[in-house]
């Protein structure tokens, strides 16, 4: 009889944390719990980043970056009947917002609600073809009127979908916000493992859980500037294209369970790229290759041009259905990513740099 798979507690607690951009407190607390005890130096900053450092006196340094924030909704208006209207935090697909259970973070705790829209029975044929605009959707918290609603929520409160972690089959699982709780888990767990091998490291290792990636890679701008590392590897999710309605001629071929996606292109330093490939092959870690001709849609684009410039790489955790309430990954890929970061860090030599 096959035993049920188990997810790491660190990852599970990050996934349970509700942390839309600008309201990352719950994820910060999880990172504090798991990373701070093993770091030689542990810092936080004004934008909400969390920074763990090993071997702070070493000259050659590597920054591992994953972001803590997730998509969310923010209340911006309450009508006379007590229905809440909202703006989006991050890049939502409007077609998936309606009919969702949501959890609103308020000063008095969680308020539960449902995103509403006019029922299909009440639409004519033309209406049924339209995707509602954000201002045409609302959150229903079963309030009697505006006064009661505002006694329970405030303008500016944030909400997340009420979709939690669950295994689908084997090590494949679904959850809200694998983007990018997966990445912040990977860089934090890599530091935890490397903390047991500090004597074998010639590099300073900095693992950063960045804030506000979903609204413009803002945390990465600050953390990379302040750290001024020699090398960096950003860790985010990447599009798994092994599902229907995904033209591989446009998007490439990437599969769950086939290892980290290693990116090539102008955003990527060729020395870092080759070191990632060499580390993967030397340690029998499967990997996939992506070509991206533009600055990537990740923290890597900010890190590369921070301060005097940083030799930057990018690995991505393959993920289906990005920016929906039910994202899907294979947890084995997360493990491969951790192994790759650890091997990369252990392969760095004192005095190396990314100049080419």
Image (cartoon, helix red, strand yellow):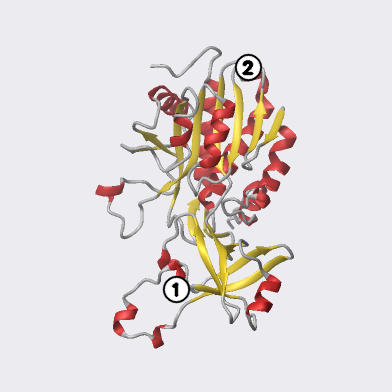
Screen quadrant of the N terminus: bottom right
- The C terminus lies in quadrant: top left
Q: Along the polypeptide, which appears first: circle 2 or circle 1?
A: 2
Q: Secondary structure at mark 2?
A: loop
Please state the horizontal and vertical placement of residue 118, each as a whole percent of the image: 44, 81
Is residue 206 visible to us here? yes
The answer to whether residue 163 of the structure is visible from this angle is no
Q: Position of residue 34 (x, y in %)?
A: 70, 41
Q: Residue at x 53, y 66 (%)?
A: 86
Residue 132 in picture, x, y percent from top left: 40, 72
Image quadrant of residue 107?
Answer: bottom right
The residue under label 2 is 58
Q: Nearer the viewer, residue 32 or 91?
A: 91
Label 2 – label 1 distance at C-alpha: 55 Å
Within-10-Å neighbours for mark 2: few <14, some 14–19, many 20+? some
Picture layout, residue 290 above or below residue 158: above
Q: Which mark is residue 283?
A: none
At 53% from the left and 12% from the top, the residue drawn is: 351
Tell me which corner region of the image, top left, top right, bottom left or bottom right, holds residue 37.
top right
Q: Are marks 2 and 1 in contact (CB under 8 Å)?
A: no
* Residue assigned mark 1: 136
Q: Residue at x 71, y 42 (%)?
A: 32
Residue 106 at x, y percent in the picture: 68, 64
Q: Classify 277 as above or below 161.
A: above
Q: Describe the element under mark 1 as helix, strand or loop.
A: helix
Q: Is residue 249 above or below residue 102?
A: above
| Residue reaching furthest to the left | 249
Q: Nearer the viewer, mark 2 or mark 1?
A: 1
Give left or right: position of 235 versus 125: right
């Amino acid at each position: 009889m096959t035993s049920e798979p188990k997810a790491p507690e660190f990852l599970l607690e990050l996934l349970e944390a509700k942390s839309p951009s600008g309201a990352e407190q719950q994820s910060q607390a999880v990172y504090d719990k798991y990373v701070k005890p093993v770091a030689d130096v542990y810092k936080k900053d004004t934008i909400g980043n969390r920074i763990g450092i090993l071997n702070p006196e070493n000259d050659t340094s590597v920054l591992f970056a994953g972001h803590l924030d997730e998509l969310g909704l923010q209340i911006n208006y309450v009508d006379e009947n007590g229905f809440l209207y909202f703006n989006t935090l991050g890049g939502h697909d409007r077609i998936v917002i309606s009919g969702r259970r949501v959890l609103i973070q308020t000063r008095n705790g969680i308020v539960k609600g449902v995103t509403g829209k006019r029922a299909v029975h009440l639409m004519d044929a033309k209406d049924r073809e339209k995707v509602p605009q954000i201002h045409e959707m609302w959150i229903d918290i079963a309030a009697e009127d505006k006064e009661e609603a505002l006694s329970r929520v405030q303008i500016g409160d944030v909400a997340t979908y009420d979709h939690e972690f669950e295994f689908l089959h084997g090590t494949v699982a679904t959850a809200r916000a694998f983007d990018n709780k997966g990445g912040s888990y990977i860089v934090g767990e890599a530091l935890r493992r490397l903390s047991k091998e500090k004597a074998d490291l010639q590099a300073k290792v900095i693992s950063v859980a960045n804030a506000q990636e979903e609204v413009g890679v803002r945390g990465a701008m600050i953390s990379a500037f302040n750290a001024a590392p020699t090398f960096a590897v950003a860790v985010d999710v990447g599009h798994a294209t092994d599902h229907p309605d995904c033209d591989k001629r446009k998007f490439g071929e990437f599969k769950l369970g086939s290892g980290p996606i290693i990116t090539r292109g102008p955003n990527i330093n060729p020395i870092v790229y080759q070191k990632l490939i060499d580390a993967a092959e030397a340690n029998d870690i499967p990997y996939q290759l992506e070509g991206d001709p533009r600055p990537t849609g990740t923290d890597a684009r900010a890190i590369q041009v921070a301060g005097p410039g940083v030799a930057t790489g990018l690995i991505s955790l393959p993920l289906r259905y990005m920016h929906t309430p039910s994202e899907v990954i294979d947890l084995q890929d997360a493990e491969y990513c951790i192994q790759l970061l650890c091997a990369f860090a252990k392969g760095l030599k004192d005095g190396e740099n990314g100049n080419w």
